[in-house]
Amino acid sequence: MKTIVKLLRKPIAASILAIAVGFLIAAIVLAIAGYAPGPSFAALFNGMIGKPKYISNVVIKATPLILTGTAVAFAFKTGLFNIGAEGQYVTGTICAAIVGISCDFPPVLQVPLVILAGTLGGAACGALVGWLKAKFGINEVITSIMLNWISLYACNFVVNVPAFHQPESTSTYAVNPSSYTMILPKWKLSEEGLATLKGTPWLYEVLVKTDVNVGILIAVACAILIAVLLKRTKMGYEMRAVGLNREAAQFAGINVNRNIVTCMLISGALCGLAGALAVTGLEPHNISTLAAFENNGFNGLSVAFIAGSSPIGCIFAGFLFSGLIYGGQSVQQVMGAPSDIINIMIGTIVFLMALSQVVPMVADWLERREKGVANA
Amino acid sequence: MEVSPEYAVQMHGIVKTFGSFRALDGVDLDVRKQSIHAILGENGAGKSTLMNVLYGLYQADGGELFLNGEKVSINSPTEAIKHGIGMVHQHFMLVENFTVTENIVLGEEVCGTAGVLDMAKARQEVVKIVEEYGLEVDPDALIEDITVGMQQRVEILKALYRGADTLILDEPTAVLTPQEIGQLIKIMRDLVSKGKTIIIITHKLKEIMSSADECTIIRRGRYMGTVDVAQTNEAELASKMVGRHVNLHVEKSPSRPGETVLSIRDLHVKDDRGIEVVKGLSLDVHAGEIVGIAGIDGNGQREFVDAIDNLVHAESGTIEVKGKQIQNTTPRNTIETGVATVPSDRHRWGLVLPFSVAENSVLERHNEERFGKGIMLDLAKVEEFARGLIEEYDIRPEGCESQPAAGLSGGNQQKVIIAREVSGEPDLLVAVQPTRGLDVGAIEFVHKSLIRERDRGAAILLVSLELDEVMDVSDTIAVIHDGQIVGSFEQGTVTEEQIGLLMAGGGSK
């Protein structure tokens, strides 16, 4: 019992419990709907890790989630709710697309340039929200929701600018191939490359059948960097102080407003980076007219939530989230069960994370009960 | 003690646990009818818990309760009120923009036909009680327009209106001026002579001596005995409460004031509602001197200290520290000029509670190179620094540097703040309510720290609502009223009554 109590007190306990209960609820819903939970979950996991191609796709889809999740978690640590991750992501894709289409330098220059453009775009969006809050006290939730829509329509506007618009489509031209961040983009499709890869089937599957790209490395590196920034630097210390007790931080001479702007800037930059990496790393390497949000930013909110706002946790939560969404398609294909079951599962997990305060309370209760038994 | 109808309240062997913590461990309380019974204890000793058990807010895990010699169980405040027990909380529970009458009848309204409020009748009933007990209050005044002392009377009237025979007063004097305290004691005596029984919770020894008949002492949830107040003295009460001998009076050598460190001239500051609350305040504090500011809460103390700390904008006037004007710059600038502040609310301003003690210990100087090169923060160095402070200031529990500050007791939290502020060897130390909510032992520590800093050569500005503290610790006592310093005296040249009069706005400047 002592070990259970101890385990429950660990911060990660809430996440793991929430995920377990999420699966349980999904199993119950599946059973009620007449689908066998066991085979459904088998199909789900098979759809995540059954083939090298699947794993590769889960990793690819996890890239933006890890970045936007880290962005939201980071802002949260500073006491800010960055619901504008979606808009910052979209702005990142716009800026990356514009620069990627307009410029055509050698890859060593072009790739950093395009990615930087997207990152700066997201950073500008975030910084604007932070500045409005610091200067005029406007709640960041309101401004960032409005900026989400501004970004969406800005995207649709850019798509229709003649210089970028690809005729007879709803999208822009693709960015110049010098911007691509896939692994060996040219070689893997050349005759020589195809011949070499045929020898190792899993590598062939991963490289040729999916857009495997360097984004995931950048995303994981960013999450780790943010964790270090928060825990091991003076800047991170100030930001956490501002997030946990704004008045005490101000009293201690910490410039609260500057920290708010900086934090939103960094958070926005991460989202913009996610957008840029999507343009450079994934087919069709362009942006198209958006009828609705694609949820790359909003899902980041869920990822941050599941991770309990830990940047390192966002890496795992990002993979989990991506795996559930991607593998969920197989549940539909194999079992015929609607893939909405995945949304139920994710919804349950997020909901339970919101109740995560309960977990330490359960630990307290267990401890008390044990004591009560011992005393009696 | 035998159960007898001579006692209004008898609580025997009360046990109350919260989780693994025994807040009350077999506490006895026997309150004679028509007496004033004080409950004395340090913060966290269990005084309020005991009263909350009596008032039905908590259920005891063990023990028996007798009212007028009969065994009862009280499971809610509603039941307590039915049994004739009334409670006046430390923080008043009044509707600011309602009249006195409306507040008194709230929840027990007088209704005419068809449930229509009959305020005329309600007013009559209130007037009747007011006259019966001689508690002068205007029944038609709005709460926001009357003084704190009057508001307290309204709270007492609320309890009387509900038929209370036994009144519990929780720290009733915390917010009152000396004159108001005198009036309150008179009211309590009147109530007792009219058949009521009064229990007061307090940690102020002087008031127990001047008002109570008997006093029950609780230390760390344990019953330490009941004493007849006439047969005891302050020193005995204090040592029973703390468990060791305490110096009630601050021992210090005469001050040797040096150069002027803080010089405020004609300062005007508005509060957050835009109303001017500091109205031309001028004040000097010299090196090696403690200047205490006495005053009733809300007379501009907070705003003028905030102006020194650059947390608010000064409308006009100057604040000079060591000859350098610092008004309307930044909090950082105030700190870098050599000013350290112990804030009034340690949870709100003083600490980041979820931060570890170590992280809190560098809150103002985390940017120094010794805590990490460049942009990096070296947690090991921060913890090493904190360990030094923990040892020097005896912050408990030992080895708490990596624990969240939220887990420390109030006294130890205050020690963390004082250690942090003093460790930078400031030229000016501003201490606002530095002993608020602390027990006798911790208060002694805080006062010694202030005097040690003074003797080191720092200028000390002490702002406190506790007149005793200001009178006792300060070398110079300045009285603030309505945003101005209305009098300044050397220690020993003025009486508490004179200061009290000035605090209340009486007397000429």
Image (cartoon, coloured by chain):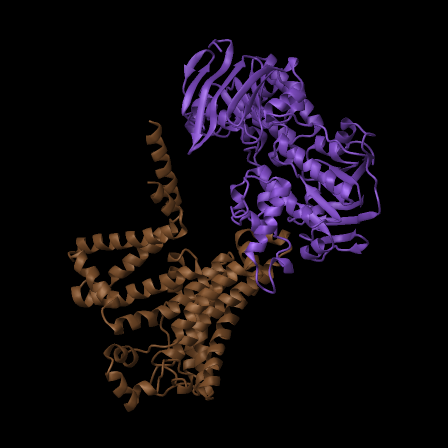
Chain colours: A brown, B purple
Front residue of this view, candidates A309 and A166: A309
Residue B363 in the image, given as x and y percentages of width and height? 61, 52
Looking at the rendering, which quadrant does residue B313 occupy? Answer: bottom right
Which residue corresponds to the image point at 72% horizontal and 28% vertical from the top-left? Answer: B249
Image check: B463 left or right of A334? right
Front residue of this view, candidates B83 and B48: B48
Residue A322 in the image, given as x and y percentages of width and height? 32, 66
Does any portion of residue A79 appear in the rendered image?
yes
Above or below A299: residue A94: below
Which residue corresponds to the image point at 41% horizontal and 17% vertical from the top-left? Answer: B72
Image check: A18 left or right of B30? left
Label count reads 0
Residue B149 in the image, given as x and y percentages of width and height? 65, 29
Q: Which residue is most to the bottom? A: A191
Q: Quadrant of the N terminus of chain A?
A: top left
Looking at the rendering, which quadrant does residue B461 occupy? Answer: top right
Q: Quadrant of the C terminus of chain A?
A: top left
Does any portion of residue A84 appear in the rendered image?
no
Above or below A266: residue B244: above
Above or below B136: residue B292: below
Which residue corresponds to the image point at 44% horizontal and 24% vertical from the top-left? Answer: B15
Residue A207 in the image, given as x and y percentages of width and height? 30, 80
Looking at the rendering, which quadrant does residue B237 occupy? Answer: top right
